Amino acid sequence: MNTAARLEELSRKVDGGFLASRTAMARFAAAPPFPVHDLGRLPIRGRVDGIDVVGIGAAA
């Protein structure tokens, strides 16, 4: 729950549409039916090393 709240907070500061962690996206069995763009490792409150983030439906 905390990670979701932090991603929502981060989405206000980053161009990328909706955000999701790379780990969460990897859990899907098939490729999503929408564009996903790697935004790299971004700093996130509460995580020393940041988190790998993707933008969903965002322009590259």
Image: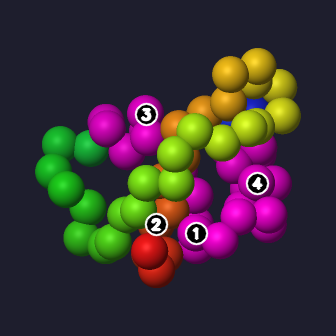
Query: Against 20, is 60 above or below?
Result: below
Q: Amino acid at mark 3?
A: Thr
Judging by the rendered image, the residue that carries numbered circle 1 is 16
Q: Range of the magenta residues?
A: 4-27
- Report the side of 7 relative to 25 (left or right): right
Q: What element does badge 4 sit on? A: helix
Front: mark 3 or 1: 1
Q: Nearer the viewer, residue 53 or 28?
A: 53
N-terminal label among 4 and 3? 4
N-terminal label among 1 and 2? 1
Q: Amino acid at mark 1?
A: Gly
> Which disc is residue 24 wearing?
none
Q: Position of residue 20 (x, y in %)?
A: 53, 51
Q: Amino acid at mark 2?
A: Ile
Judging by the rendered image, the residue that carries numbered circle 2 is 56
Judging by the rendered image, the residue that carries numbered circle 4 is 10
Q: Nearer the viewer, residue 41 or 17?
A: 41
Local packing at callout 4 (Cα closer than 10 Å; few below 14, some 14-19, many 20+) is: some
N-terminal label among 3 and 1? 1
Do tag 3 and tag 1 residues touch (Cβ < 8 Å)? no
- Report the Cα–Cα distance between label 4 and label 3: 16 Å
Q: Quadrant of the N terminus?
A: top right
Q: Nearer the viewer, residue 33 or 59?
A: 59
Q: Residue 44: say if magenta.
A: no
Do tag 1 and tag 2 residues touch (Cβ < 8 Å)? yes
Do tag 2 and tag 3 residues touch (Cβ < 8 Å)? no
Q: Position of residue 13 (x, y in %)?
A: 80, 63
Q: Amino acid at mark 4?
A: Leu
Q: Quadrant of the C terminus?
A: bottom left
Judging by the rendered image, the residue that carries numbered circle 3 is 23
- Report the Cα–Cα distance between label 1 and label 2: 7 Å
Do tag 2 and tag 4 residues touch (Cβ < 8 Å)? no
